[in-house]
Image: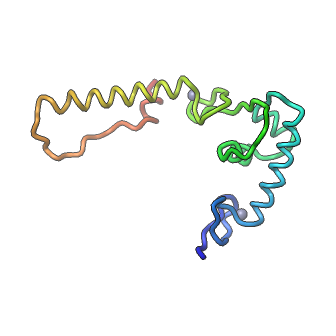
C-alpha cells in the first residue's frame, strides 16, 4: 500500500490509478453523472455550456474529458491547451499541432545541418528551444 497526495485536494490517501482521494473520487463520480445527464439532451456542447448547465468546475470537466470518462454522442468543445481555440478532440487544435510538427521537423533538419560541418562533436549540450517559446514568438 502506497500513500500519495490527492491530485484534487492534496489530502493523503492510499494511492489509486485515479490519483484522487475517496472524497474527491465520489465528488467526481457525482459530477460525471450530472454531466452525462446534461449531455443526454444535447448533440453539441461547449465546456462553458456544461459548466453552466451542471455547475461542475471546468477543471473537473476537462479531467473527465482527458480520461475519456464522458461517454456521450454529443460533440464537446473545449479550448486548445496552447491557443485556446475550441476543439472537440485531442489536446491541441490542428493549427497548433501543425506548428509543433513543423518546429520539430525544422529542429531535426537543423540538427542534421549543424552536425555536418564539424563531424567531431564537442560534447557540449546545445541550447534547445522549448515549444512554448517558439509559439510565444509567433
Ligand atoms: Zn481529494
Ligand atoms: Zn491551438
- The residue drawn where x is 48% and y is 24% is 98
**Left or right, residue 59 beside residue 102:** right
**Left or right, residue 59 beside residue 137:** right
- The residue drawn where x is 86% and y is 30% is 42
Q: x%, y% of residue 39?
A: 84, 36
- The residue drawn where x is 68% and y is 68% is 11
Q: x%, y% of residue 14?
A: 65, 72
Above or below for 15 versus 115:
below
- The residue drawn where x is 66% and y is 59% is 18
Image coloring type = rainbow
Q: Quadrant of ligand 2?
A: top right
Q: Quadrant of residue 61?
A: top right
**Left or right, residue 36 beside residue 107:** right
Q: Residue furthest bottom?
A: 1
Q: Quadrant of residue 109?
A: top left
Q: How many marks?
A: 0
Quadrant in which the N terminus appears: bottom right
**Left or right, residue 28 beside residue 62:** right
Above or below for 86 versus 71:
above
Q: x%, y% of residue 66?
A: 65, 44
Which of the pair 6/43 is nearer the observer? 43
Amino acid at each position: 500500500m502506497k500513500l500519495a497526495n490527492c491530485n484534487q485536494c492534496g489530502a493523503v490517501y492510499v494511492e489509486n490509478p485515479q490519483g484522487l482521494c475517496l472524497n474527491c473520487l465520489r465528488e467526481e463520480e457525482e459530477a460525471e453523472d450530472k454531466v452525462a445527464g446534461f449531455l443526454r439532451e444535447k448533440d453539441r456542447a461547449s465546456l462553458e455550456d456544461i459548466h453552466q448547465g451542471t455547475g461542475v468546475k471546468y477543471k473537473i470537466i476537462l479531467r473527465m474529458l482527458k480520461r475519456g470518462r464522458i461517454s456521450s454522442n454529443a460533440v464537446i468543445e473545449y479550448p486548445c491547451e496552447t491557443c485556446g481555440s475550441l476543439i472537440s478532440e485531442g489536446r491541441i487544435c490542428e493549427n497548433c499541432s501543425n506548428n509543433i510538427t513543423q518546429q520539430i521537423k525544422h529542429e531535426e533538419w537543423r540538427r542534421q545541418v549543424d552536425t555536418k560541418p564539424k563531424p567531431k562533436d564537442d560534447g557540449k549540450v546545445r541550447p534547445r528551444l522549448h515549444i512554448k517559446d517558439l509559439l510565444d514568438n509567433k
